[in-house]
Amino acid sequence: MDSRTVGILGGGQLGRMLVEAANRLNIKTVVLDALNSPAKQISNSTEHVVGSFSNPDDIRKIAAKCDVLTVEIEHVDVSTLKELTSEYPNLKIYPTPECIEIIQDKFLQKQHLQKNRIKVVDSLPVDSPTKNNLLELGRHFGFPFVLKSRTLAYDGRGNFVIREEADIDEALKVLENRPLYAEQWSPFVKELAVMVVRSVDGQVFSYPVSETVHQNNICHICYVPANIPNSVELEAKLLAENAIKSFSSCGIFGVEMFCLENGEILVNEIAPRPHNSGHYTIDACVTSQFEAHLRSILELPLPKNFCNLSTTNTNVIMLNLLGDVAIKNNELKICERALSTPGASVYLYGKESKPNRKVGHINMVSSSMDDCIRKLDFITGKTSKQVTISVTDRMTI
Ligand code: ATP
Ligand code: MG
Ligand code: MG
């Protein structure tokens, strides 16, 4: 399909699913990560680079082997990427180093969005993390508020909710030596996420809104369509598209949002890459988030409606599969039940099972959401109430 080689910084599950989409189109990929990482397991290229996306030498090695360089993670060494743009004038890097630089520092990202009139939660920098300064922030925002690491955050590791003054000492200890900022508490009734594709010529396209439920700060379940009024769906898509228009970059982005009781929506954070909340697109949309990313960075066609649901009555639930806390690999029992469930597709990432580690996901597609929930109940062997919130518990706004 394309004679160019795509280099991927990071070979986890997102890299693996990018490689899978590339393989179908016969697009060559090379991956930079540890030996036998999930993405490398499904690609027999002899060109993969063993190393790290934060190591300048390793990034240079992969850059020498590809025409387009992309990422599956934003925590990469940006200064090396910037240098590469002059060392390899023909190399395309998407997302652009400038875009990654803003997004990988969550406070810079918030400032950038605010400057571009995108509604976000109020935040302030914490340049000097002392008890007194945090007390002052508590007075400013009120309690609870959230102390967050500006960099290298994922799955809530890097966040500390300060519920009262007495939590401050522990927060400072847990987030010691990390660059910090503070965020107002957002009393959301739902979390939403929208995948947005930006083409090289600056057009943006958004996928349907996904209603995301987190457990212990880790994405647990996504429902699409989200249980929200049409007006909120349209506003969320518009907000996400506007947020992505503010970056001169290209490819897929995940926009995480908070939806307040009155239907107001704020951006929580943006990922400049495929995103967990977009895994449902593999089975429920015309084009998956992974293929859409490849098509956009390679300037391949993105025809009309490519990001629509496959049919107007497609409903889907995505369940993340986390490593069982008590018994190693016990989560595979969920997969076995999924394999015998009509409309369910199992994705395993080739990762060792460890407690609460994301090791796979399951998409359940049906013409009704009630039916998707019945499938979820069967697959998890529980009622959906025990798994998460049931349809009736999903707050109506
Ligand atoms: P990710 O894995 O999505 O990158 P992260 O480590 O960057 O996660 P955040 O997205 O900042 O973390 O926060 C994780 C979760 O914590 C959010 O999805 C939300 O449930 C909750 N949260 C974060 N910030 C706030 C806030 N200001 N008010 C209320 N809840 C919050
Ligand atoms: Mg994050
Ligand atoms: Mg997040």
Image: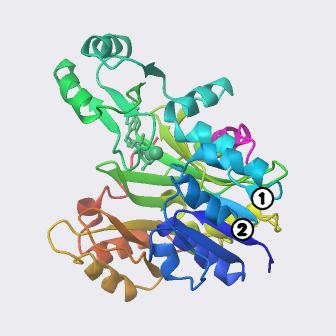
Which residue position is annotated with label 2?
66
Q: Is residue 325 left or right of residue 88?
A: left
Q: Quadrant of residue 45?
A: bottom right
Question: Residue at horizontal 56%, vertical 44%?
Answer: 270
Q: Which residues are magenta?
A: 239-249
Residue extending furthest front? Answer: 57
SS assignment for the magenta stretch, majority: helix
Instruction: Assess whether residue 226 is covered by the magenta stretch.
Output: no
Q: Residue at x 63, y 48 (%)?
A: 80
Badge 2 vs badge 1, beta-carbon distance below 8 Å: yes
> Would residue 380 be seen by someone viewing this image from the given angle?
yes
Where residue 290 appears, x then y in whole percent?
62, 67
**Viewer-side residue, 279 vs 130:** 130
Q: Position of residue 276 (x, y in %)?
A: 48, 59
Is residue 312 in sight in this rendering? no
Of helix, strand and loop, which one carries label 1?
loop
Quadrant field for ligand 3: top left
Question: Within 10 Å of the Cα at label 1, are there few (<14), some (14-19), or many (20+) other Cα atoms?
Answer: some
Q: Specify how the rendered protein is coloured.
A: rainbow
Q: Residue at x 67, y 83 (%)?
A: 24
Q: Amino acid at mark 2?
A: Cys
Q: Which residue carries the number 1 mark?
A: 91
Residue at x 23% of width, y 64% of height: 355
